């Protein structure tokens, strides 16, 4: 019998976990396949780990990995991909914003043989603050134009994949991970399943506006060299403008004998050019910092506790 591995990253989800487990088990047990639930405790500070221990004690199909600290959702997903054993692998959030009821439909679509992955996206952003929705739409529009990542607007991490696709994701062992971009970059055929936005069943979101903005910037830097090109074009543009300004000043001085006056305009020009230089240096600094983290070859995660001995504790 084929097996579905369900990867569930958890960070301070003690309120949502019991609800998620109950609803998801109902769906999985009604499907004509075996399953395993892999919960990743990403350094939670509440009772998440205690709940996972209890679930693992009463259900042999539950596996949990508990990180030594908070490594982030990307590391949690990578840990799940590295340890999943099923022919099909899914990623879901524990807050019930990824409806478990969609799993049978997703599996049926994969079983047809035409697609390697069934991914989900939201039909609307109903319930989100307008400014956050606007920035999200702009992000998807920009990253699809300047990179090879193919990301649908409103895309969720919730997707069901064949084993071949998961193995390709694991092979991309980069430290600075942006899974939405990786899913699109590896190029497997994906079917997009749209559904209405669902609110959290319990607890509070861990993604503030600034965390999402940082995540978006990381995604652009990880999958595009366009910002470096922008810095280069800025440099050439300012060089050209400066050259034209020098010619203008020299000609005016020779033709009219008009000395250059006004410290205010000089200060404004110096400040403007200095700002452009710092902006370009900041762009280059982002790429250098990513390279610095990659060359150190630090592990993506460190597991401090698990109920399965064959789990990869450091990777």
Image (tube, rainbow, N blue to C red):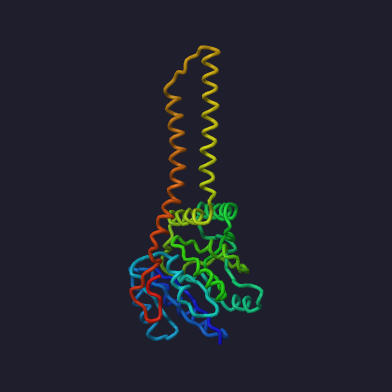
As drawn, which residue projects farthest toward the front? 295
Q: Residue at x 41, y 67 (%)?
A: 203
Rendered residue at 43%/32% (across/down): 271
Indicate the quadrant where residue 270 lies.
top left
Q: Where does the image place residue 74, in percent across and percent down from the top left?
A: 45, 65
Q: Residue at x 57, y 86 (%)?
A: 32
Would you say 273 lies left or right of 116 here?
left
- Residue at the far top in the pictured view: 257
Q: How many marks?
A: 0
Is residue 309 positioned above or below 73 on the image?
Answer: below
Q: Residue at x 47, y 74 (%)?
A: 7
In the rendered view, tell whether residue 88 sits above or below residue 71. below
Q: Nearer the viewer, residue 254 or 182?
A: 254
- Decide which of 5, 120 is in the foreground and name it: 5
Q: Vertically, is 309 above or below 257?
A: below
Q: Where residue 31 appears, x then y in whole percent? A: 56, 84
Question: Could you tell me residue 81's position as x and y percent?
Answer: 48, 73
Quarter that holds the C terminus: bottom left
Q: Locate the N terminus and report the quarter of the image it occupies.
A: bottom right
Q: Quadrant of residue 114?
A: bottom right
- What x and y, as percent, mark residue 106? 59, 75
Question: Image quarter for residue 154?
Answer: bottom right
Q: Which sits in the foreground, 202 or 14?
A: 14
């Amino acid at each position: 019998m084929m097996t579905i591995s369900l990867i569930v990253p958890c960070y301070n989800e003690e309120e949502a976990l019991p609800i998620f487990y109950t609803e998801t088990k109902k769906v999985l047990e009604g499907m004509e396949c075996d399953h395993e639930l892999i919960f990743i405790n990403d350094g939670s500070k509440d009772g998440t780990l205690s709940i996972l221990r209890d679930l693992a004690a009463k259900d042999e199909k539950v596996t949990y990995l508990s990180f030594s600290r908070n490594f982030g959702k990307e590391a949690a997903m990578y840990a799940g991909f590295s340890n999943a054993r099923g022919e099909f692998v899914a990623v879901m959030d524990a807050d019930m914003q990824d409806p478990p009821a969609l799993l049978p439909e997703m599996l049926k679509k994969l079983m047809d043989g035409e697609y390697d992955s069934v991914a989900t996206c939201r039909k609307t952003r109903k319930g989100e603050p307008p400014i956050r929705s606007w920035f999200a739409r702009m992000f998807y529009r920009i990253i699809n134009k300047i990179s090879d990542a193919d990301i649908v607007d409103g895309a969720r991490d919730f997707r069901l994949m064949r084993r071949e696709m998961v193995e390709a994701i694991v092979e991309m062992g980069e430290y600075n991970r942006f899974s939405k971009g990786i899913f699109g970059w590896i190029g497997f055929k994906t079917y997009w399943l749209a559904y209405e936005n669902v609110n959290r069943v319990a607890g509070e979101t861990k993604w503030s506006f600034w965390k999402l903005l940082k995540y978006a910037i990381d995604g652009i830097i990880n999958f595009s060299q366009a910002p470096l090109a922008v810095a280069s074009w800025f440099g050439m543009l300012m060089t050209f403008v400066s050259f034209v300004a020098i010619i203008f000043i020299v000609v005016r001085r020779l033709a009219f004998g008009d000395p250059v006056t006004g410290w205010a305009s000089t200060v404004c020009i110096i400040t403007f050019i200095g700002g452009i230089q710092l902006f370009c240096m900041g762009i280059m600094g982002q790429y250098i910092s990513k390279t610095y983290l990659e060359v150190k070859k630090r592990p993506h995660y460190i597991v401090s506790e698990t109920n399965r001995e064959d789990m990869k504790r450091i990777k």
